[in-house]
Amino acid sequence: MNISLHRPPLSLVWLAAAIFAWLPASLRAQQWLGDEFPVSLVPLPEVDPAPLAAFDQAPLADDLLEPPRSSQAARSLDDDMGPPGEERSPFRSRVYWIPTQKVLSQPDDWSQAGEQINLAAPLYIAPGGGNLWLATGTIDHLSINTGAILPDSQLPVPDNLWKIEGGAMNFRELDNGWKTAAILTIGSVSDQPFDALRDMTVTTIGSLEVPYADRDAWNFSFFYSPTSQLPYPLPGLAYIWRPSEKLRANIGIPFSLQYRPTETFSIVASYFPLTDATILATRQFSDSWSVYGGYQVVNETYWLADRLEENQLFYTFDQRLTLGLRRKLVGGLSLDFTAGYVFDREVFQADGFSDNRRDRINIDPGALGAVQLIWSL
């Protein structure tokens, strides 16, 4: 099978159509949101892990309106890593590719490419603020070109893997100053999406922020997704420390750190068990140009339609070093170009990330290229 290189332009066409369809509602949301998002969520998994560079906004990871996903690594900038957005981005389209490399345990090659479109738009905005409902949607496609087989089950490696999900977010600011958030997504993550009920997935995230002292807060959260590295309900507790406008840290689980020593340089980092980790440095040269570099652990999970065990997940795992360039365009659009080095690459099947692994395939390290188009409020 050949990787379909004609898909990236098509995904950008879909994005452009979505922008024209969702623009009026998104602008109404910005009027309600103002300069600060109503809820301060610590970076939870499954909602993409690079925290925001803008410290006055809630670090829901790369974007406040980024829809949740159903794999542990989806909180990263998906399959590439770009700089944290300075505004909310309800529309995003990205494509990436990893050229051909050798499979270590079999006489075969391996290459892959992917495309993704993310959308978010308001469903309800309470008069006077304090209550916001958002609809979210994600289409994520991974194409694999290889003749390798899964060595234990003797199944072929799937040519195409899909994540198609939709959901809703609710953000509230209570009269006593407490802030809440609830996120729900439902969809299918499989090589044959929506083919069977057992291939469906549900992701739930909840958060409560309680102010403490003058600038700080406590954040209580929970997370559940059957396709995460830890596929059971997980509580979270973090102390949100804001000693100055230059530094913000969520100390606990999940963990994140955001440091902006100058107006043009920032460093962000985040971690969620077991291996969801991101470190990113961004240098802005002008209003239009910025460069960024970082490290990221990427782990994606899927239900294979022909899997031999009901709870067995198909994992793709790697680590990445990236360097990128962002150019701001007109009308809130920006374009990212990313290059990187991908290593520690493997795929396998298991009931959980740390359980006994079967069908393990290791792949040589190689290069990564990515392009991302973003529309920000």
Image (cartoon, rainbow, N blue to C red):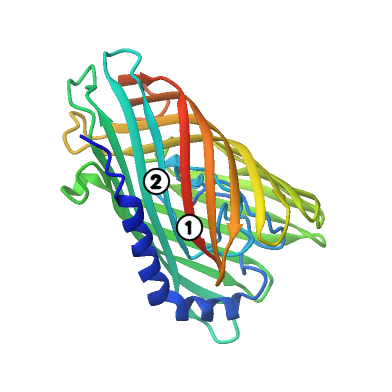
Disc sitting over residue 225 in the figure: 2
Frontmost residue, 156 versus 353: 156
* Marks 1/2: CA–CA distance: 28 Å
Q: Residue furthest bottom?
A: 127
Residue for point 29% across, 40% down: 143
Q: Amino acid at mark 2?
A: Ser
Dot 1 alpha-carbon crowd within 10 angstroms: few under 14, some 14 to 19, many 20 or more: many
Asked which secondary structure carries label 1, the reply is strand
- Against 249, residue 102 (above or below) is above
Q: Position of residue 235 (x, y in %)?
A: 53, 45
- Which of the 4 quarters of the picture holds residue 103? top left
Front disc: 1 or 2? 1
Q: Amino acid at mark 1?
A: Leu
Quarter occupied by the C terminus: bottom right
Asked which secondary structure carries label 2, the reply is loop
Q: Position of residue 194 (x, y in %)?
A: 20, 51
Frontmost residue, 14 versus 218: 14
Which comes sooner in the sequence, label 1 or label 2? Answer: 2
* Residue under pointer 1: 373
Can the viewer see residue 125 in this picture?
yes
Report the side of 245 relative to 177 (left or right): right
